[in-house]
Amino acid sequence: MPTLAGAQVVDTARRDTIPPAVDTGRQITAAYVDSLMSDDSLMKDLSAFIDSLSRPKTLLAIELGVGNGFFTTKSATAATGYTTKTFLNPSVSYLHKSGFGISAAAYATEDQGMWTVYQGAITPSFDIGRRHWAAGISYTRYFNKDSISFGVSPLRNDVYLYGVFKKYWLEPGLAFDWTFDMYQLETIIQPTAYPPNNRLDTFANNIYAHVFAGIFTLQHDFEWFGLFNKNDHFAFTPTLMTLADASNYNISVSRVQKDGGKSKSKLQALREPKQTTPVTFESISALLNGVYTYKHFLISPQVLATYFLNASTGVQPFRVSYLFNIGLVF
């Protein structure tokens, strides 16, 4: 039942290919683009992949999680390319015994001395569980806050499909993730060579981005019933995984001119050739996922260690994420 936090599996994107959505004037660096690969989002999707395999009845879960995320800010160090920020993740999930489910989550962290909700998400899903296999599909729509000082992935739509074969002691699994969106970057230029120095040229960059990822996993579930009394249960699932992805994006540029704030004319529209990144192995990871329940009470600690194979120069490729969830399940 625990829902891990993050900013979607766009972290599978090649960091040197997809432009980030940033405020006007923010410097676009390799470290910033690399920060789109936030570990906590991969934890969320892969934990949902693991935890959704067993749904014996209709369930309602209310949870609060605390974890660490990786973000690029002005204080990011050259040695890592990112700073670590603690975030909170409240969530509500409803899972029907038929396999249909829906969940809502929010993500909050400290920004410029104040706690703020920087992202929200709504996820409808459907899962099928059988004795020797399980499969499911989900769609997540993300809602990002604009006025924040750190980078959040601009890709707000995510389709996730998984399958796992449970017949043997080591259970192989395969998941596919498609992340996509259209977003806009604006650059405003005020020429100084034209009197009365009040003409503004605005260049709007419309970016259409798609990322497709594949994840192969090997896992085993350990379970203990009645560990301390007859009403408790503990499950522990270690998982090894490797991730590969491909991406492409198109950019169209339009130029709008304002003279003294009175007139506005669209001067030109250009489209750049499609940029495509071939399939590339991006990372290898180990996920440790534990869940303890006592009647309606739930505790879930989770740790993800990831090594990024194609991290940008000067960016630390090894990262460790954690999330600790508590909640009530009915």
Image (cartoon, rainbow, N blue to C red):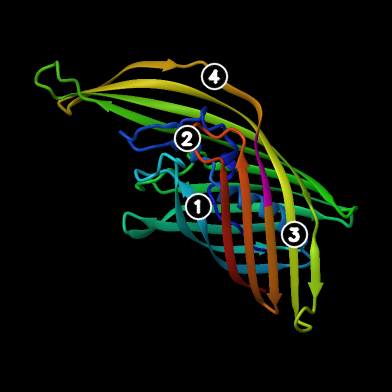
Element under disc 4: loop
Amino acid beneath label 2: Gly
Discs 4, 1 touching: Cβ within 8 Å: no
Residue 203 in which image quadrant: top left
Between tags 2 and 3, which lies in front?
2
Q: What's the amino acid at mark 3?
A: Thr
Q: Which residue is mark 1?
A: 69
Asked whether, in this view, residue 222 is left or right of residue 213, the answer is: right
Q: Residues within 10 Å of mark 3 (few under 14, many from 20)?
A: some
Q: Secondary structure at mark 1?
A: strand
Say which of 260 and 249 sits in front.
249
Circle 2 residue: 314
Amino acid type assigned to the residue bearing label 4 in the image:
Lys
Label count reads 4
Q: Which mark is residue 147?
A: none
Q: CA distance from mark 4 to mark 2?
A: 28 Å
Element type at marker 2? loop
Q: Is residue 45 above or below residue 328?
A: above
Residue at 53 percent across and 45 percent down: it is 38
State the CA–CA distance, disc 2 to disc 3.
Answer: 33 Å
* Residue at mark 2 to residue at mark 1: CA–CA distance: 19 Å
Looking at the rendering, the stretch of residues picked out in magenta corresponds to: 282-286
Decide: few, some or many residues near mark 2? Use Cα within 10 Å; few <14, some 14-19, many ≥20: few
Which of the two labelled residues, at mark 4 and mark 1, occupies the earlier sequence position? 1
The N terminus lies in which quarter of the figure?
A: bottom right
Q: Which residue is mark 3?
A: 237
Comes first in the chain, label 2 or label 3: 3
Question: Reading the chain from its start, which is encountered first: label 1 or label 3?
Answer: 1
